[in-house]
Image (cartoon, rainbow, N blue to C red):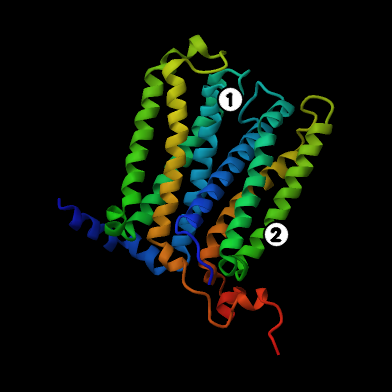
């Protein structure tokens, strides 16, 4: 199927139309997306810092991981759902946006990086669970994870800034001139 | 209107989002401990020792990056209902976090501090952070408040 036709079909779907027609849906989806990413990143940092030996060093790695991972996954699903709902409102424009494309690529890399961690240090976790940091490649994967997620957040903000940012940066009403507040009393 | 480099605002906004993620993550883990959903091997004091400083640091980072955003775009921020409602909730969160930290440090016996009241306060802090995220986003869409928004009154 032609991608162009597919994106147009997404944009014409009932869900996309309802979100576009509503004053509240899109900002609400954005807010839910930020909430979800806050839990995703906030919880991944905890595990990555433990693997790097920078925090929670005296606790078992597996305990720190089990504290957070189910919340990370639930929030990740929420971020995917809210992200997909925002995407379908303007699919073709998002798909053509460089920051969007880079973000999707980085999400894929973050997934592969997680797999790398699981297949290396993760597989032998019983051997180093109490150690202050993950061995060898596990430490590198944790550092890469932090770098990838920070860049993913940055790309996400840039998508909003280059696409929906236009709507949120309308000039303020002419009757409110902030310079009036800054310049002191007008000269008589 | 003032001029700035095109990258400045999205860069500070990104920093602001990273800081709120750190705040939410840290408050979430303290909440999970209080509700018995995480770190069962740790006392509340130990959990708070691990995440308390991250909560404080991320709140400072939020205030600093937020202040930069106000200076960069004062009209966008200050002439909105969302912003002022958000600031009221920010004051509540700062007071709650400070009071909670004091309470945990003062509680002499291990886990004596886990009471229904502290659970409620911690959960309220997390809910307020979520509401702050919503209001932060609504600054860009203040018209959703209708006549409450100063921007639509004009």
Instruction: Name the subunit of mark 2.
Output: B
- In the drawing, does residue A7 fall left or right of residue A25? left
User: What residue lies at 63% left-to-right and 46% top-to-bottom?
Assistant: B61
User: What residue lies at 72% left-to-right and 54% top-to-bottom?
Assistant: B91
Outermost residue to the top: A127
User: What residue lies at 42% left-to-right and 25% top-to-bottom?
Assistant: A141
Query: Where in the figure is residue B127, as x and y percent of width and height?
Result: 63, 49
Instruction: Name the subunit of mark 1.
Output: A
Outermost residue to the left: A1
- Residue situated in front as seen by the camera: B106 or A9: B106
Query: Where in the figure is residue A32, as x and y percent of width and height?
Result: 49, 52
Query: Where in the figure is residue B154, as x and y percent of width and height?
Result: 58, 82
- In the drawing, does residue A83 fall left or right of residue A7? right
Of tags 2 and 1, the one toward the viewer is 1
- Residue at image mark 1: A54
Please tell me whether mark 1 sits on a helix, a strand or a loop: loop
Residue B131 appears in the picture as rendered: no
User: What residue lies at 73% left-to-right and 53% top-to-bottom?
Assistant: B92
- Residue at image mark 2: B88
- In the drawing, does residue A153 fall left or right of residue A8? right
Label 1 neighbour load within 10 Å: few <14, some 14-19, many 20+: few
Please tell me whether mark 2 sits on a helix, a strand or a loop: helix
- In the drawing, does residue A109 fall left or right of residue B69? left
Count how many numbered circles sit on residues in the image.
2
């Amino acid at each position: 199927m032609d991608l162009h036709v597919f994106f147009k079909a997404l944009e014409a779907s009932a869900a996309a139309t309802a979100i576009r027609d509503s004053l509240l849906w899109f900002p609400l989806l954005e807010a839910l997306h930020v909430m979800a990413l806050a839990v995703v990143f906030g919880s991944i940092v905890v595990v990555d810092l433990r693997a790097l030996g920078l925090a929670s060093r005296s606790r078992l790695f597996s305990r720190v991981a089990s504290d957070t991972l189910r919340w990370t996954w639930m929030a990740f699903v929420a971020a995917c759902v809210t992200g997909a709902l925002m995407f379908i409102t303007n699919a073709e424009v998002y798909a053509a946006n460089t920051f969007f494309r880079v973000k999707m690529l980085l999400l894929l890399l973050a997934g592969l990086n997680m797999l790398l961690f699981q297949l290396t240090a993760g597989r032998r976790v019983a051997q180093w669970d109490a150690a202050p940091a993950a061995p060898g490649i596990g430490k590198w994967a944790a550092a890469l994870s932090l770098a990838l997620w920070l860049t993913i957040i940055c790309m996400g903000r840039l998508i909003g800034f280059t696409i929906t940012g236009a709507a949120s940066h309308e000039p303020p009403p002419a009757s409110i001139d902030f310079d009036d507040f800054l310049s002191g009393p007008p000269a008589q | 209107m003032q001029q700035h480099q095109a990258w400045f605002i999205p860069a500070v906004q990104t920093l602001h989002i990273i800081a709120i993620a750190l705040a939410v993550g840290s408050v979430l883990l303290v909440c999970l401990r209080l509700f018995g959903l995480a770190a069962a091997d740790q006392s509340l004091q130990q959990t708070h020792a691990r995440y308390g400083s991250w909560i404080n640091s991320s709140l400072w980072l939020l205030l600093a990056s937020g202040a930069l955003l106000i200076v960069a775009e004062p009209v966008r921020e200050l002439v909105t209902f969302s912003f002022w409602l958000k600031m009221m909730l920010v004051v509540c969160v700062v007071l709650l976090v400070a009071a909670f930290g004091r309470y945990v440090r003062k509680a002499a016996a291990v886990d004596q501090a886990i009471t229904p009241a502290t659970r409620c306060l911690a959960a309220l802090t997390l809910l307020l952070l979520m509401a702050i995220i919503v209001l932060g986003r609504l600054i860009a869409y203040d018209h959703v408040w209708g006549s409450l928004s100063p921007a639509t009154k004009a």
